[in-house]
Each structure stands twice: as C-alpha cells, then as structure tokens.
Image: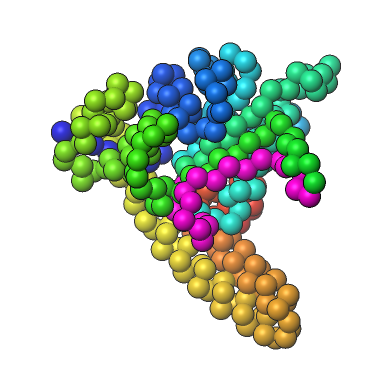
C-alpha cells in the first residue's frame, strides 16, 4: 500500500475538510479541553473563505473552518513553512471569524469562542515543548483570562511519542501527521487499530486520487521546495542588506530596522518571481507572509 503525505494541502483538506467524524476526533484530541463536557459532539463545515463585511478590507482563506452545536468556531491550518508574520495572520483570521458572528443588533453576550489550531511543519521556538497554548491573560496580578480567542500552535518536528497517558489520541493523530508519507511501507499497528486513524489512512492512499490530483500533489511539493530555497536566499540577502544599513546608522535599532527592511524587500521580490511562475496567490501569501493585495501590487 502506498500513501501520500497527509500534511500536503490536497490531502490535509481531504481528510479534515470532508469528514466530520475525523475533524471532531482531531480537534478533541489536540485542543486543550479540560473536561468531557467541553468536547465537540458535532460540527458543521463553514466556508474556509473569510470575507470581510467591508469590501475594501482584506479577505483570507483557511484550510478548515467549522462550528459545533454550541456555536463555537474552529479554524484549522497546516503551515509548512514558518514566517515571523504567521502569528499575525492567525490572529487576523481568528478575530475576523469572531466578529463576523455579530449581527446588526450587536449582542456581544451572544459571541461564542473561536479556537485556532495551527500545525506547523517547522520550528519557531528555542524551547523543547512542541505544544503552545496562547490566551488573552492579565499578567501582573489576577491572571484573569478574557475568553473568546484561543490559539494553539504545534511544532511538528519537535513531536516525539513518549507515552500515551491521558492524551492517547493526541499522540496517535500527531504520529499520523509525522510518520505517514510517500516512504511509508508498513503502518504501525497502533495507528491501524484505531478506527479514526484507520479511516484517515484510507483517505491518503495513493489509489484514492485521480491522475490530475496526483499531479497537483507533486506540484505542491515542487513549489514548496522552490519556495524554501527562495526563503533561504531572502534571509541571507535581507540580513546582509540590513547589517549594512544598520552599520551605516551605527545603532542597534537602526540595524534591526535595516534587517526588517531588507527582508521585506526580498519577500516582495520573491513574491513577484513566484507570481510570474504561476503560483497561486494564497500559497505565495503563506510562504512570504505578504497580504494578497501586497502580492497583487508587487
């Protein structure tokens, strides 16, 4: 049996964007619910396109977006490359989903929480922990939490299945994402024996995809590889330009601004090159961190 990598755009959306039972299991396993009462029982898929009420504002597209019977919304994204702007993009999308619940009556008490779950196939923190839980917290005294938005980031390269304990399904789902790919010839028994994981494995069997889908799948990885090379080059050139500018100013602050300016200039240059190569704006945005309107004007 030959499998495709579930982290790819095509496969990830097929598994979690088309099967309610799988996304329910996935969310319950990876979100920080503290009791069974908090767990998701049913979901309704929502449009992954977050369209602003004001047509002059930015729109954006996420991988999977759904809500449960309580009205809570869940945004799931698979991010293959980390950029410093990604957290701002996540905050922007979750905030947009949150405020979009308001009708003309403006009953704020009716607003339901939005959870943003982000799987990152890259390392962005220095520590050993792979699971990061962000909330709006009063820091100095009360530690009181403002409910409404919650952000989970998971660094997949740091994940290692140490022990199951109470988070058995979390381990199984993360093993599914990190251990299954084109080189998989024998799936671990623990994954096959679990009904949800077993179904998710069937969804990424190569035989389940059309020839056109397989070509799109290969194109995704080709573009990702090319984008990684562009990003490496942009970082190096941006740092060089920034250091030169910073040294000219003779101040650390100036150096930091120079590096940022150099990196931004290089991102725009790369976006232009990718756009000329026919890469979709959504993918360019994810790779470079630029907004769609910045890409359009590059």
Residue 279 appears left or right of 136? left
Residue 280 position within the rendered picture, expressed as x and y whole percent measured from the top left: 48, 44
Q: Residue at x 78, y 50 (%)?
A: 140
Which image quadrant for residue 23?
Answer: top left
Q: Can residue 143 be seen in this view?
A: yes
107 within the magenta span: no
Up-down relation of residue 285 to residue 205 (above or below): below
Q: Can residue 274 be seen in this view?
A: no
Which image quadrant for residue 90?
Answer: top right
Which image quadrant for residue 101?
Answer: top right
Residue 6 appears left or right of 193? right
Residue 179 position within the rendered picture, expressed as x and y whole percent measured from the top left: 29, 43
Give whichever of 3, 234 is nearer the camera.
Answer: 3
Give whichever of 149, 62 is nearer the camera.
Answer: 149
Up-down relation of residue 255 to residue 42 (above or below): below
Extent of the magenta region: 120-140
Q: Residue at x 36, y 48 (%)?
A: 160
For the stretch drawn in magenta, what is the main secondary structure? loop
Up-down relation of residue 75 to residue 225 (above or below): above
Q: Residue at x 39, y 48 (%)?
A: 159
Up-down relation of residue 248 to residue 4 (above or below): below
Residue 73 position within the rendered picture, expressed as x and y whole percent measured from the top left: 60, 25
Residue 170 position within the rendered picture, expressed as x and y whole percent measured from the top left: 41, 34
Q: Quadrant of the C terminus?
A: bottom right
Give whichever of 105, 284 is nearer the camera.
Answer: 105
Q: Residue at x 53, y 74 (%)?
A: 237
Give whichever of 30, 100 is nearer the camera.
Answer: 30
Colour scheme of this structure image? rainbow
Q: Quadrant of the N terminus?
A: top left
Total marks in image? 0
Residue 250 appears left or right of 89? right
123 within the magenta span: yes
């Amino acid at each position: 049996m030959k499998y495709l990598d579930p982290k790819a755009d095509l496969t990830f959306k097929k598994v979690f964007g088309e099967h309610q039972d799988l996304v329910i299991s996935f969310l319950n396993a990876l979100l920080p619910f503290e009791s069974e009462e908090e767990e998701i029982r049913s979901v309704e898929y929502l449009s992954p396109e977050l369209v602003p009420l004001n047509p002059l504002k930015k729109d954006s597209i996420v991988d999977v977006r759904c809500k449960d019977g309580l009205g809570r919304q869940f945004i799931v994204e698979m991010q293959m490359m980390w950029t410093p702007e990604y957290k701002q993009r996540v905050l922007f999308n979750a905030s947009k989903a949150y405020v979009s619940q308001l009708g003309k009556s403006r009953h704020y008490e009716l607003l339901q929480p939005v959870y943003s779950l982000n799987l990152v196939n890259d390392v962005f923190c220095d520590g050993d922990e792979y699971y990061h839980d962000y909330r709006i917290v009063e820091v100095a005294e009360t530690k009181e939490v403002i409910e409404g938005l919650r952000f989970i980031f998971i660094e997949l390269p740091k994940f290692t299945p140490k022990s199951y304990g109470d988070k058995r399904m979390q381990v199984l789902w993360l093993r599914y994402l990190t251990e299954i790919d084109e080189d998989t010839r024998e799936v671990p028994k623990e994954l096959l024996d679990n009904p949800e994981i077993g179904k998710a494995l069937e969804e990424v069997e190569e035989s389940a995809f059309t020839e056109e889908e397989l070509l799109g799948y290969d194109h995704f990885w080709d573009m990702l590889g090319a984008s990684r090379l562009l990003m490496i080059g942009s970082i190096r050139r941006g740092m060089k330009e920034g250091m030169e500018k910073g040294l000219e100013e003779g101040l650390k602050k100036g150096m930091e601004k120079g590096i940022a300016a150099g990196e931004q200039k290089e991102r725009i240059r790369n976006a232009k090159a990718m756009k000329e190569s026919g890469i979709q704006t959504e993918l360019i945005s994810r790779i470079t961190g630029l907004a769609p309107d910045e890409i359009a004007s590059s």
